[in-house]
Amino acid sequence: MNRAFVSGQRFALVATCILFGFSVIFGRLFYLHVLKQSEYSQIAEQNRNRFQVLESRRGDIVDCNNNLLATSKEVRELGVDPQMVGEVDAAALNKLAGYLNVSVNWLRQRFETKRYSNGRDIRWCKLADAVDEKVYQEILQIGIKGVYGNSKYTRYYPGKSLAAHIVGYINRNGPKGQAVMGVEQYLDFYLRGQDGWRESEKDGRRREIIEFRNREIEPADGYHVQLTLDMLIQHMVEEELSRLAEEYRPVSASIIVSDPTTGFVLAMGNYPSFDPNEYSKYPLENQRNRAVTDVFEPGSTFKIVAAAGALNERLVRPFDTIDCDIAEVNYHGRNLKLPNDHNKLGVLSVEDIVAKSSNRGAAQLGMLLQEEGLYHYASLFGFGKKTTLGLTGETSGVLHPVDRWDGLMITRIPMGHAVSATPLQVHQAMGVIANGGLAMKPQVIRKIFNEGGQPVHVFYPKVTERVVSVATATTVAQMLNKVVGPEGTARRAFIDGYGVAGKTGTTQKIKNGRYSNRDHVASFVGFFPYQDPRLLITVVVNEPELDGIGYGGRVAAPAFRNIAEKCIRYMAIPPQAPDDVVMPQSGHETIELSLFPQRQVSMHTHEPSQRLSVEVFRERQSRNRE
């Protein structure tokens, strides 16, 4: 341009504008590449780099026959990138909404919302948490751009509520893979495995550039767990719980089935229950494993402690008799009132005290052991301490040390008052008698194994205590067989051709600080065949509703029989020959109990002139302790 035709002022203005424009550009470049270089380099790196977590597969939980109780299914977490969504016709939107079971308006809102409140672009909006692979492929066929899914695993429980309290569940709404209860939580370290990861780069359309993949660590899947549970026996138990709930409308109920010789739990069920696939739809209290968390006064089921202890110390013999009509005895210089019996029972042998469930007879047997002896045997039988089954929430129950006993507790504890226990503790105590005097550790886990089926850790039967001698356990088992006889309290537990041994319990609940005459806990715990036990079954029903008192023999004993009869058919347990074992009868003795020096407790004998004095009893105690 010829400057003759351009004024100097106009030329300066244009030059200044051009110079200012280049200054702005260079200033912006300086700001981006020098002042903000570190920050924007990091943002660019984040946008270009792709870090992907490779989720490990959680191990399966199976029963003793390898039937699935918990497994992990591969699903798709479905979402949309709103930045990539263009115009979507109504037909496609309606079809997608149908697959996801959501409204069209809800779906359109997520497609059209493209930015967060802070102005940043939304690049991922979740539409569904777990879509089956088949459904996912059908969704892709709709052809909506920007809709895609990421592969993940979700926990699935094929049996629904079956063994829910034992298996536990995974909380989908909490931290990733958070195990909440049961075996899922107890063995979470072995089940969860180890996630892997992958580092690579992605293009402008957020697709991975495979050739720039620079690191990849494969995930290590979790180990599998085999339980001692038998799914079919568990199903029998839960069917019976449903029947009890329908017939008696109890507050709660628990049933446990185990092999007494190993301590392996074959079934453990509770009412009310829940479905771990949809745990959020149930009250939180339904998730409590009441068989190990809830305590109750065991009542007459506890009488095996006093009877077995007195027999084991050779303080009494099965056919020694005790006057169960007396209302008061002198104990260490104090007159103590004995608990009442439901009927007037008169003079009973030790065997009949157990069979007819005499409170007064049990109290006097407890007095023979004295406080320290009774506490010692109660502790050996497992009361007052956890069974260490390995499930969350287990409580130890209550067995007060002797220095906290009041004057009447020596007469009340032998009948199962002033002590509390979980259904599993009562179950374990009866297992001592069923297993020849040995206490077995209850277990629900059989082994941990890898994908190839090779065991990583095996759990074997474990003896925790020698509680009483084999002879004592055999004698008590024979006594408990009479409980199921015509004159016993558990006639409804009788099974023709099979010798059942067991004990009922009917416990008044404490309401407002007093024993209630209306609210009871009915229980029965027994095993069969009592000469060669195959199964140990405990039934506890909390506050059954019925006309009259909910006795254990009326409510719980029939449930025991129903489960036992089904197990006999399932396990092909052969009937037993008639009992050829005769209980030793060395003559009924008239004895003056060693602990009652100022008041004789009448005991009858074939030889009325024979009396065991205080000194003889104390000598017997001393000899046995030595």
Image (tube, rainbow, N blue to C red):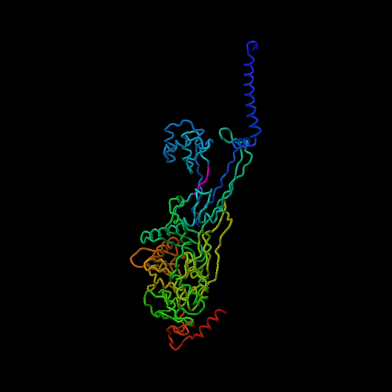
Residue 412 visible in image = yes
Magenta segment main secondary structure = strand
How far across and how far down the image is residue 320, in percent? 45, 81
Is 431 in the magenta? no
Q: Nearer the viewer, residue 127 or 461?
A: 127
Q: Which residues are magenta?
A: 151-155
Residue that protrudes farthest toward the bottom in the picture: 609
Of the 4 image quadrants, the one containing the C terminus is bottom right
- Please tell me which residue lies in front, 4 or 44: 4
* Residue lying at 65% horizontally and 27% vertically, measured from the top left: 26
Closer to us: 398 or 429: 398
Query: Which of the pair 307/61 is nearer the observer?
Result: 307
Farthest-out residue, top: 4
**Can see residue 506?**
no
**Residue 335 image point, x, y percent:** 44, 81
User: From the viewer's perspective, is residue 239 above or below residue 57?
Assistant: below
Name the residue: 63% across, 16% down.
Answer: 9
Vertical relation: 185 (above or below) 8: below
